[in-house]
Image: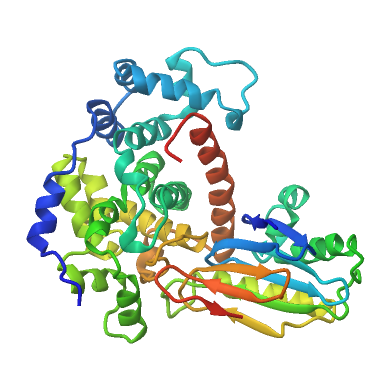
Amino acid sequence: MKQRASKEEILAAIREVPLLSPSASQLLQLTSSSDHELSEVIDIVKCDAALTARLLKIVNSVAYGLVHQVTTIDRAVGYLGERMIASIALEDSAAALFHKELAGYDSPKSELWNHDLRTAIASREIATYAKQPLNQDLAFTAGILHAVGKAVLSDFLTQSSNEVLTGIDADEVSDYLAGERKLVGIDHTEAGYELAKNWELPEPLIAAIRYHHNPAATPEEHRALVYAVHLGCIIAMMCGSQASDALQYHLDQDYTKYFDLTSEQLTMVMLEVNERFDTLHNAMTDAGGEH
Amino acid sequence: MSNIILGVGEFGISKTPGDIVKTFALGSCVAVILMCPKTRTVGMVHVALPESKINLEKVKTRPGYFADTGITALLKLMSTMGCEPKGRGFIVKLAGGAKIMDPNNTFNIGKRNALSIKKVLWKYGLGAVAEDLGATYSRTVSVSVSTGEITLSSPGRSDWKL
């Protein structure tokens, strides 16, 4: 049997993951607070020449189909919206994580990013069905980040997929998270949580990373957001995912406390996810992303 | 010899020996595979949702997206290759329609897709001779035009035949 790393070794590896760029970090902090102006987002972007160039490329890509070329960052930010700005900054800053091949999940290059983008779109859509007002931009960003723990845990789970799936099929473990814990003593939500703390991410985003497969355990103030990401992640997997853990998690029925969502509306969310994913994916690829 | 890759809501055909008709990572989506023995044409549609009534605009650009329009569109395309327009004598196989772990089946769009597809097939007097539907894993489907053999794969599992 293959000798697996210990939890301590994995935590040590997480501490070695490079920090986010200052602009990505500031944008996440700013856009997670309810009290900010779009001009503050623009000010951060203006201080990062590479990010400015990439945003202009994206907004002028064929996928966005604008008639007139956008040449100023103010207008680019206006067109793209702050959730896209934060996501693009994150993608650029942590491309090595988001786009790597995840051998531990039999997942090809960029598949994690594709799943994250679908989850982000779905989480934002789900937020529109919330019983109490819920920040849709924050749901999008939380969706982008939710599974980042898989990128760090994957290296320690190589050639384990079949073992985990066999354990689930035989009812030895209840889901993929339990399978991860059985093998290496830590699951991808806890690994992501440790990374998120090192990155000093805002609290709601840390909560989404930590509890997206167990939303009931979320502190009350972030629970609705985390349920949105919980459903977003599931919908993204239903839309298609090339990873061994696809669909190997439980739906928490208590989402109905926070969202009014009929079966018909669910199909509309799925339609929106596939449509928007194609547009965003094409725009980011045209503009020289890591795809 | 080439791979014909079908995305979500796309459909395609081939009668060229050596070609592979393929679609990746079906979650709750269902692949409907139609084979015409007379012309040795293979067709496949990647159905995402059960009913087109939620977005009739989408039907114009991508009829394969919905069960109730996708099969008709595929049959029409296959008829251009000399196949019987209503699919008489076709071999039909289905794969996909997976679900999340949920005993209440609240999110079981895969099951709704499969039911809607079977209803349309029934309308044409067709029925699947083989199917691999449901369960909680994604499926990639590859059909060999030379042999009609269908291979299913899923990350972390051994390949299997349909």
The image quadrant of residue B82 is: bottom right
Q: Which quadrant: the N terminus of chain A? A: bottom left
Figure label count: 0
For this rendering, which residue is in front, A197 or B75? B75
> Residue at the location (24% across, 73% down)?
A178
In terms of image quadrants, where is residue A4? bottom left
Instruction: From the top left corner, tell me how far across and down residue A49 is, in percent.
Output: 34, 17
A207 relative to B105, above or below: above
**Where residue B60 sits: x, y (%)?**
78, 49
Task: For residue A14, say whether it is visible.
Answer: yes
- Residue at image point 77% right, 61% down: B13
- In-image side of B91 versus B76 (left or right): left
Left or right of A61: which side holds A123?
Answer: left
- What is the image's colouring? rainbow
Q: Is residue B48 visible?
A: no
- The picture quadrant where one finds residue B29 is bottom right
Query: Which residue is drawn at the image coordinates 35% and 76% (left, top)?
Result: A165
User: Which one is in front, A127 or A146?
Assistant: A146
B12 vs B159, left or right, is right
User: Does residue A136 lie above or below A150 as drawn?
Assistant: above
Residue name at image x 38 percent, y 51 percent = A112
- Give the x, y percent position of residue B1: 70, 58
